[in-house]
């Protein structure tokens, strides 16, 4: 199971990029690599000798913006846990719950040529890149307003989905252990495990908040989970004037390393099959790699449009633009969003909406607008640091605010009753009764009529 608490950009063993270098920040985000700000991390090095740990930890605090000016303090420590605890305490003073260190928890060990093989908490981030895991198939996040662990979505046909877990459910216990104060990475580690084993979770139904009857205990068998980021189909659609057209429906469930390439291939396939319009479904997509979100946006846009604005720690707004973009298709587009659309999903939705490329249909998005660097340290731990927040191309704040769609996801505003909307459709059982899909088709008809009139 991949943790979805934050949107992350990978960084390989580098701490030299400075946030106050505006040019480097723009270039690094565009490339998918963001250096952590030394002035924000209060961390220079962690030096442990294996198998015994050193008894002190050297921590460097930048005394000014000049990287060579630092204050050094040495803490006496008796264990690695004490070191990580000390670092976590320092990072917590920054007031950002997403800036944190993840230690190399030893959840499994066996000897191979006298070397230990360890499963790490850091895998909860890395799993999102290759899309394979053994677990229950849940995307979870800490709800910023309450601090509770909530389910953003379930992988389709996963053990969690078959057990009746739904988006919006709150996780209360895992294997009898309360989750108060536990972050999503730690919870993910508890849920993940060898296929064939099982895990017991206690959940509070999101639809029964405040009611004791909404709490239930569920035993979920673990299995092999394949996180394919894209699913697609053709939806036959009859326009108001009676013409039968084809709408390309694309659901993007996460922003992995392959998301943009998979999206491009999918659009090419749908174009060859005669799609005349598109619905891009970002509902319950919790995010992923920032670069993937930017790359997917460029598949739909032309020119040198602004994709997102990054705001650094000093309040400087840094626009990130395309360079000579060429959209694969210019057909009408509707993007579906909801409360589970977060981070990179909000970047993509904002880019397409604010540049006039798409209509947004659904419900207000999650509101996660932070950009992070991820630094893997030599001992297998990982440092997650918030380096900027982002605004939409039209400078709308997203963090803790979310994006409000153009059209809410109800059929009340449609002039035709639901029965007539479904008539003459071929059987697309999972989609045909979806009110958001029907509203999206209506909006595509409106776009088409305006285009014809012009």
Image (cartoon, helix red, strand yellow):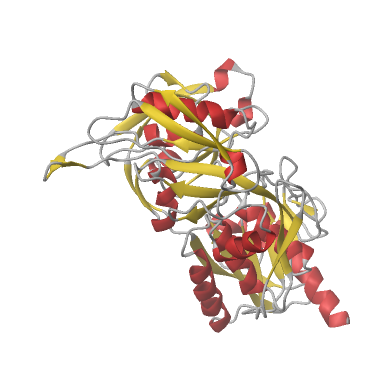
Judge by depth and name the residue closer to the eye, 45 or 277. Answer: 45
* Residue placed most toward the observer, 91 or 44: 44
Residue most toward the top? Answer: 212
Judged left or right of residue 62, residue 202 is left
- Residue 164 appears in the picture as rendered: no
* Residue depicted at 72% across the width and 75% down the height: 304
Q: Which of 339 and 185 lies nearest the eye of the viewer?
A: 185
> Whole-percent x and y of residue 44?
48, 41
Query: Relative to residue 273, is residue 211 depicted above or below?
Result: above
Question: Which residue in the rendered view is the most extreme toward the left?
Answer: 113
Residue 217 versus residue 410 in the image, above or below: above
Q: Residue furthest right?
A: 454
Q: How many marks?
A: 0
List x then y, in percent, for residue 270: 55, 76
Quarter of the image that includes the C terminus: bottom right
Identified at 34% across, 21% down, the residue is 78
Q: Quadrant of residue 366?
A: top right
Q: Residue at x 40, y 37 (%)?
A: 46
Q: Is residue 394 left or right of residue 63?
A: right
**Up-down relation of residue 185 to residue 335 (above or below):** above
Q: What residue occupies the far front of the structure in this picture? A: 69
Residue 234 in view of the camera: yes
Q: Quadrant of the N terminus?
A: top left
The part of the image, by quadrant, that contains residue 309 is bottom right
Residue 324 at what x, y percent from top left?
A: 67, 80
Is residue 170 found left or right of 240 in the rendered image?
A: left
Residue in front for this viewpoint, 96 or 60: 60
Q: Residue 228: x, y in percent? A: 43, 59
**Residue drawn at the location 71% of the way across and 60% of the way down:** 308
């Amino acid at each position: 199971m991949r943790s979805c608490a934050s949107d992350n950009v990978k960084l390989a063993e580098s701490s030299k990029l400075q946030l106050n270098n505006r040019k480097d920040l723009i270039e690094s985000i565009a490339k998918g690599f963001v250096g952590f700000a030394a002035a924000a991390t209060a961390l220079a090095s962690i030096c442990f000798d294996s198998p015994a740990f050193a008894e002190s930890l050297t921590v460097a605090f930048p005394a000014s913006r000049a990287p060579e000016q630092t204050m050094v303090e040495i803490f006496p420590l008796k264990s690695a846990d004490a070191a990580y605890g000390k670092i976590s305490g320092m990072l917590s003073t920054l007031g950002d719950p997403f800036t944190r260190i993840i230690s190399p928890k030893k959840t499994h060990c066996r000897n191979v040529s006298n070397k230990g093989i360890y499963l790490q908490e850091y895998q909860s981030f890395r799993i999102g890149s290759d899309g394979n895991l053994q677990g229950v198939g849940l995307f979870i996040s800490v709800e910023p307003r309450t601090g509770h662990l909530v389910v953003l979505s379930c992988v389709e046909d996963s053990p969690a989905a078959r057990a009746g877990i739904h988006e919006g459910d709150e996780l209360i216990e895992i294997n009898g252990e309360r989750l108060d104060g536990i972050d999503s990475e730690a919870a993910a580690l508890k849920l993940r495990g060898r296929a064939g084993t099982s895990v017991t979770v206690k959940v509070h139904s999101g639809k029964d908040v405040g009611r004791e009857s909404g709490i239930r205990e569920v035993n979920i068998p673990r299995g092999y989970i394949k996180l394919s980021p894209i699913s697609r189909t053709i939806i036959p659609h009859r326009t108001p004037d009676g013409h039968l057209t084809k709408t390309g429906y694309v659901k993007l469930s996460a922003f992995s390393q392959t998301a943009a390439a998979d999206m491009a291939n999918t659009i090419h396939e749908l174009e060859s099959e005669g799609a005349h319009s598109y619905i891009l479904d970002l509902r319950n997509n919790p995010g992923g790699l920032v670069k993937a979100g930017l790359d997917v946006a460029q598949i739909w846009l032309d020119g040198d449009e602004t994709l997102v604005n990054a705001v650094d720690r000093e309040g400087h707004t840094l626009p990130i633009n395309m360079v000579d973009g060429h959209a694969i298709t210019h057909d009408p587009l509707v993007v579906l969003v909801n409360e589970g659309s977060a981070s990179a999903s909000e970047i993509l939705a904002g880019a397409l909406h604010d540049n006039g490329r798409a209509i947004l249909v659904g419900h207000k998005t999650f509101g996660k607008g932070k950009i992070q660097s991820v630094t893997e340290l030599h001992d297998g731990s990982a440092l997650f640091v918030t380096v900027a927040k982002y605004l939409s191309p039209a400078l709308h704040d997203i963090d803790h605010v979310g994006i409000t769609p153009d059209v809410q996801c109800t059929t009340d505003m449609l002039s035709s009753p639901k029965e007539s909307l479904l008539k003459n459709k071929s059987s697309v059982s999972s989609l045909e009764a979806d009110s958001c899909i029907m509203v999206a088709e209506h909006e595509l008809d409106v776009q088409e009529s305006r285009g014809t009139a012009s």
